[in-house]
C-alpha cells in the first residue's frame, strides 16, 4: 500500500470524512420514497431503514422499507401503465425513451459515479466504468427495440405462418448490491425495449442510485412503467417473486436466494431468469506474456474489490512459470492502494458492509486453519485512517486443498486461491470441479491452447487474454448453478417476450 504517509492518520481520516460528507450533500437523491405510479410515496409499513457509507460507517440516507402491500400497489400501477399507455408505445417510442434515459444518466455521470462509490464503496475510477456501461446498455437496448422482429415461417402453399414477440406485460426484477445501477440497467434495458412495465427492487445495501435514476428520468418514463420498491429481501423481494400478477421474474444475486426465487416463481408458473454466483477459474499457460498476465490476473480478482460475480477467484498457473509469476503477482497485489474510494489513486475500496467483511474473514480463517500458505494479505489493513471502514487486504492463498470450502464456495471479496498445474487434463478437471459455471479466463499466446481451453471450460463467459470486459451485445450468463438465461445482448430481449404464432390457412 502506498498512501501518502506525510500526513497523520488522524488528518487523513478527517479528510476522508469531510470529503464524504461534502460529496453526499452534492449527489444524494432528493427523494427517498418508493417510486410507484410516477409518485414518491411512503411504505405501507410506516418503516424506513438506513443505508450506510462503508468507508466512514456513517448513515447516508434513510429509505422506505417496502412490504407486500407496496409490491401489490406497484404491480397494480405497472399493469395500469401497461394497459393504458405502454402497450401502445411503438418500437420507435420505446427506442426514443431508452435513448433519452441514456442521455439523462450521461449528463449526470460524475454524480452517479460518486453516489455509487459512496453507497457501495467501489473506487471512483471503477464507478465511472459502471456508469458508462449503464449509458451504453440503455443505448444498446434502445437500438434492439427497433430490431427485434418476428418471423415468417416457410412451410408450403397451404398456409402462412407468422410469429410475434409480445411483451409479458408486467415483470419483476431483483437487484444485488455489487453493481447497483449497472445490474438494474442490464434488466431495465431489455424489459423496456421488449415493451414491458417493471417492478424493481434494489438491494437493501445500495438503494440510492436507482432512486436517483428515477428522479432523473421521471419525465421520460410514463408514470407506472418503472416502479421502484426499496426494502429487504424477505419483506419486499419475496412478495415480488411470488406475486400472481408478475409474468416474468429476473433475479441477480446469490445462488441460495436464486433457488428460493425460482421456487416461488414455480407456484404461478412464472418465467424466471437467474444471474447467480461464481467461482471462476483463471488459467495461465507457460507461454503467457507474463507481464500482461499478471495485470490481467490483478483485474480478474481485485476489480470491484473482488465483489464481482465473475471474479477469477481460482488461479491455475503452469509449474514452469510458477515461481516468477507468483512473485510478480504478489508484488503487484502489494502495490495496490487500499484507500478512500473517492480518491483517484485508490485501487480497492471497502467491502459493502461489516457483515460482508465478516463473511470474507471467515473464509480466510478456514483457509488458515487448513495450513494454507498466504502469499500476501489475509487481514484487515493496519491503517487508523481506514479503521471505520469495511476494508480487507488483497489476499492470495496458496497450498490449499481444492475441496476446501474456501475454494469451493464464493467468497465475494478480494481473495484468490492459487494452484499449480502440469498436466492439462488434470488441471481442466479441477478448473471445472465446482458447482458454478459463470466465467473463466485463459492467458496464453498460443491460439490452439486458447481454443482448446475455451471449449473445455464449463462456463458461460470465457475471456482470453482479458477479463471482466462487458461490452453491450456480448451475452452474459452462467452454466450450472450460476444461472439461467443471458443478459446484455439481444438474447436478453427474448427472455422478456413470449412468442405468438399465427397460422393463416390459404
Ligand atoms: P443476495 O443476498 O442473493 O440478494 C440479491 C437480492 O435478492 C437483493 O435485492 C436481496 O434483498 C434480495 N433477496 C434476498 N432474499 C430474498 C428473498 N427471499 N426473496 C426475494 N429476494 C430476496 O445477493 P447479494 O449479496 O445482494 O449479491 C451478491 C451475489 O450476487 C453474489 O452471489 C454474486 O455472485 C451475485 N451476482 C451475480 C451476478 C451475475 O450476473 N451472475 C451479478 C452480480 C452479482 P436485500 O439484500 O435487499 O435484502
Ligand atoms: Mg449502503
Image (cartoon, helix red, strand yellow):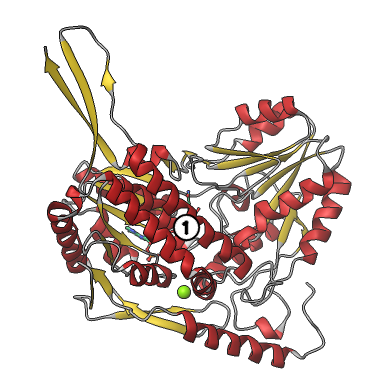
Q: Position of residue 397 (x, y in %)?
A: 73, 55
Q: Quadrant of the C terminus?
A: top left
Q: Position of residue 265 (x, y in %)?
A: 25, 47
Q: Which residue is mark 1?
A: 135
Q: What's the residue at 37%, 51% (across, down)?
A: 189
Is 212 placed above or below 225 here? below
Q: Position of residue 459 (x, y in %)?
A: 55, 36
Is 222 placed above or below 163 here? below
**Figure quadrant of residue 69:** bottom left
User: In this orientation, does residue 379 appear?
Assistant: yes
Callout 1: helix, strand or loop? helix
Q: What's the residue at 56%, 72% (across, down)?
A: 121
As drawn, is 209 to the left or to the right of 365?
Answer: left
Q: Position of residue 412 (x, y in %)?
A: 56, 58
Nearer the observer, 313 or 299: 299
User: In this orientation, does residue 175 appear?
Assistant: no
Q: What's the residue at 51%, 40% (across, down)?
A: 474
Is 438 placed above or below 505 here? below
Amino acid at each position: 500500500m502506498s498512501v501518502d504517509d506525510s500526513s497523520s492518520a488522524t488528518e487523513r481520516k478527517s479528510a476522508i470524512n469531510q470529503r464524504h460528507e461534502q460529496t453526499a450533500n452534492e449527489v444524494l437523491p432528493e427523494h427517498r420514497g418508493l417510486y410507484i405510479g410516477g409518485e414518491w410515496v411512503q411504505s405501507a409499513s410506516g418503516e424506513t431503514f438506513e443505508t450506510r457509507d462503508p468507508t466512514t460507517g456513517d448513515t447516508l440516507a434513510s429509505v422506505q422499507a417496502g412490504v407486500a402491500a407496496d409490491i401489490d400497489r406497484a404491480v397494480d400501477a405497472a399493469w395500469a401503465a401497461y394497459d393504458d399507455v405502454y402497450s401502445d408505445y411503438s418500437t420507435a417510442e420505446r427506442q426514443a425513451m431508452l435513448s433519452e434515459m441514456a442521455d439523462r444518466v450521461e449528463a449526470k455521470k460524475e454524480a452517479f459515479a460518486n453516489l455509487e462509490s459512496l453507497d457501495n464503496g467501489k473506487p471512483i475510477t471503477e464507478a465511472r466504468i459502471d456508469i458508462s456501461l449503464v449509458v451504453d446498455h440503455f443505448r444498446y437496448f434502445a437500438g434492439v427495440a427497433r430490431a427485434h422482429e418476428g418471423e415468417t415461417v416457410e412451410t408450403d402453399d397451404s398456409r402462412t405462418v407468422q410469429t410475434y414477440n409480445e411483451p409479458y406485460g408486467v415483470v419483476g426484477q431483483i437487484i444485488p448490491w455489487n453493481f447497483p445501477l449497472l445490474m438494474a440497467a442490464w434488466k431495465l434495458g431489455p424489459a423496456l425495449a421488449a415493451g414491458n412495465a417493471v417492478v424493481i427492487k434494489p438491494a437493501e445495501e445500495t438503494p440510492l442510485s436507482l432512486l436517483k435514476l428515477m428522479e432523473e428520468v421521471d419525465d421520460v418514463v410514463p408514470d407506472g412503467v418503472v416502479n421502484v420498491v426499496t426494502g429487504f429481501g424477505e419483506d419486499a423481494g419475496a412478495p415480488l417473486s411470488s406475486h400472481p400478477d408478475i409474468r416474468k421474474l429476473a433475479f441477480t444475486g446469490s445462488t441460495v436466494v436464486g433457488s428460493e426465487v425460482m421456487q416461488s416463481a414455480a407456484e404461478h408458473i412464472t418465467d424466471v431468469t437467474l444471474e447467480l454466483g461464481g467461482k471462476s477459474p483463471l488459467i495461465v499457460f507457460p507461454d503467457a506474456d507474463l507481464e500482461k498476465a499478471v495485470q490481467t490476473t490483478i483485474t480478474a480478482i481485485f476489480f470491484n474489490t473482488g465483489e464481482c460475480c465473475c471474479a477469477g477467484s481460482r488461479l491455475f498457473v503452469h509449474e514452469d512459470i510458477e515461481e516468477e509469476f507468483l512473485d510478480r503477482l504478489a508484488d503487484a497485489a502489494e502495490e495496490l492502494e487500499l484507500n478512500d474510494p473517492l480518491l483517484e489513486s485508490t485501487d480497492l475500496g471497502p467491502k459493502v458492509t461489516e457483515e460482508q467483511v465478516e463473511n470474507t474473514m471467515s473464509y480466510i480463517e478456514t483457509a488458515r486453519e487448513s495450513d494454507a500458505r498466504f502469499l500476501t494479505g489475509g487481514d484487515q489493513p493496519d491503517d487508523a485512517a481506514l479503521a471505520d471502514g469495511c476494508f480487507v487486504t488483497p489476499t492470495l492463498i496458496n497450498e490449499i486443498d481444492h475441496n476446501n470450502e474456501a475454494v469451493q464456495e464464493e467468497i465475494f471479496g478480494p481473495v484468490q486461491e492459487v494452484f499449480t498445474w502440469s498436466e492439462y487434463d488434470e488441471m481442466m478437471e479441477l478448473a471445472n470441479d465446482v458447482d458454478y459455471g459463470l466465467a473463466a479466463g485463459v492467458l496464453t499466446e498460443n491460439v490452439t491452447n486458447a481454443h482448446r481451453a475455451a471449449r473445455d471450460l464449463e462456463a458461460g463467459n470465457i475471456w482470453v487474454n482479458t477479463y471482466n470486459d462487458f461490452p453491450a451485445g456480448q451475452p452474459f450468463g452462467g452454466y450450472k448453478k450460476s444461472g439461467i438465461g443471458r443478459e446484455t445482448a439481444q438474447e436478453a430481449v427474448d427472455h422478456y417476450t413470449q412468442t405468438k404464432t399465427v397460422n393463416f390457412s390459404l
